[in-house]
Amino acid sequence: MHHVLVNERLSPNVTRLVIDAQRIAEIRQPGQFVIVHLGPGAERIPLTIADGDREAGTISLVIQAIGKSTADLVEVPVGGTIADVAGPLGRPTELPDHGRVLCVGGGVGTAVILPIAQELKHRGVAVTSIIGGRSREWVILEPDLRACGEVITCTDDGSYGRPGFVTEALKDALAEGGIDEVFAVGPVPMMRAVANLTRPLGVKTTVSLNPIMVDGTGMCGGCRVTINGAIKYACVDGPEFDGHAVDFAELVDRLSTYRPFEQFALERRGACSTTAEDAAAVAAAVAAATTPAGAAR
Ligand code: NAD
Ligand code: FES
């Protein structure tokens, strides 16, 4: 059992949980994740370790409540418990020891950027973070990243910081030159756009992928991605990969496979019995997901 010590809302649908997890706090490295299982009957949710305190034996998880399982998780109050937290999983981020690095975080992906920026600062690398949200209240972790270096904040609607997507600010930063490496985490279209900007300049670009995961140990195949034409499993080979080598179109396709099921589960969240109407809705979701246009791959 892991106790929730802090439950803090960071944006309209993003929450930070600080939980006790002594062993994970001692050995975790930037880029690694855990798989959280709230209790009997709950789904297993992969979450990047956003921060940690070795002395206190705690880790921070930043969760976007977009489905039933994540909505249930963010409702665990301070003092409540999470049954299992497995990890740290995945390969740690390969970080440089010198030079100038841009860390680009879109929305909740900013939480994955934070431990990378912290470790880069610790190594003496010059870090500029470019972070973005739909509007002011969707920008997260700005003060934490300011502790690591310069921060350029962007909002889609211009309500805070620079107006426009993070990629607009990235374009200008790349044009200034002197950038050795870019780390980018956020929505898939954002990571693809970042890779498209850095590829012609030959700037090394690392992205963190978020395919559907089940076991987190390389056995189920759920997190399959294609990198440079070769099959990789994000849970054991990643989750970070060379952004210039990722098949983003396949990732988008695979991420959409279970969307109707997730929507159904969210809508029926809290229901304790399955009715004939529920069964019909599930059948409709299956049909929608397996028609040629949305067929599972
Ligand atoms: P969002 O849709 O609100 O977008 C956040 C920001 O990303 C925007 O403000 C904009 O600056 C940028 N952006 C969005 N679309 C873009 C585009 N087409 N081109 C350039 N920039 C673009 O983000 P959200 O709702 O917070 O979702 C974040 C996403 O990050 C989720 O899809 C989640 O699955 C993903 N994620 C990934 C990881 C990972 O490890 N890879 C971890 C957590 C979350
Ligand atoms: Fe099962 Fe990666 S989550 S192989």
Image (cartoon, rainbow, N blue to C red):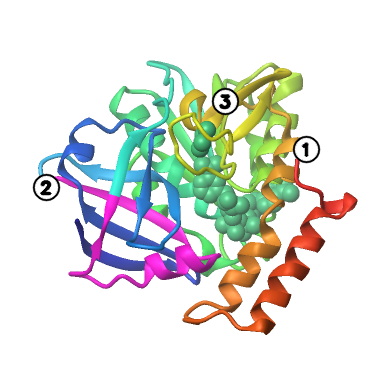
Query: Where 12 falls versus 54 (above or below)?
Result: below
Label 1 sits on residue:
249
In the picture, the disc for residue 151 is none
Q: Quick check: is 276 in the magenta stretch?
A: no
Q: Which residue is mark 2?
A: 56
Locate the N terminus by quadrant.
bottom left
**Residue 256 image position (x, y, % from top left):** 71, 52
Of the pair 162 and 223, the residue shown nearer to us: 223
Judged left or right of residue 201, residue 238 is: left
Which quarter of the image is occupied by the C terminus? top right
Q: Earlier in the sequence, mark 3 or mark 1?
A: 3
Residue 96 x/y as whole percent: 42, 17
Report which residue position mark 3 lands on: 241
If you read the primary sequence from the N terminus, does the residue marked by circle 2 or circle 1 appear first?
2
Q: Is residue 202 visible?
A: yes
Decide if residue 292 is on the left or right side of residue 198. right
SS at badge 1: helix
Marks 2,1: beta carbons within 8 A? no
Q: Label 3 amino acid?
A: Phe
Q: Few, some or many C-alpha atoms within 10 Å of disc 2 (few <14, some 14-19, many ≥20)?
A: few
Quick one: label 3, few (<14), some, or many (20+) residues within 10 Å? many
Q: Does any atom of ligand 1 lie closer than 8 Å to the CB of label 2?
A: no
Q: Which residues are magenta?
A: 56-84
Could you tell me which residue is drawn at 40 percent across and 42 percent down?
A: 114
Residue 175 vs residue 226, the one in the foreground: 226
Residue 107 location (% of width, % of height): 55, 55
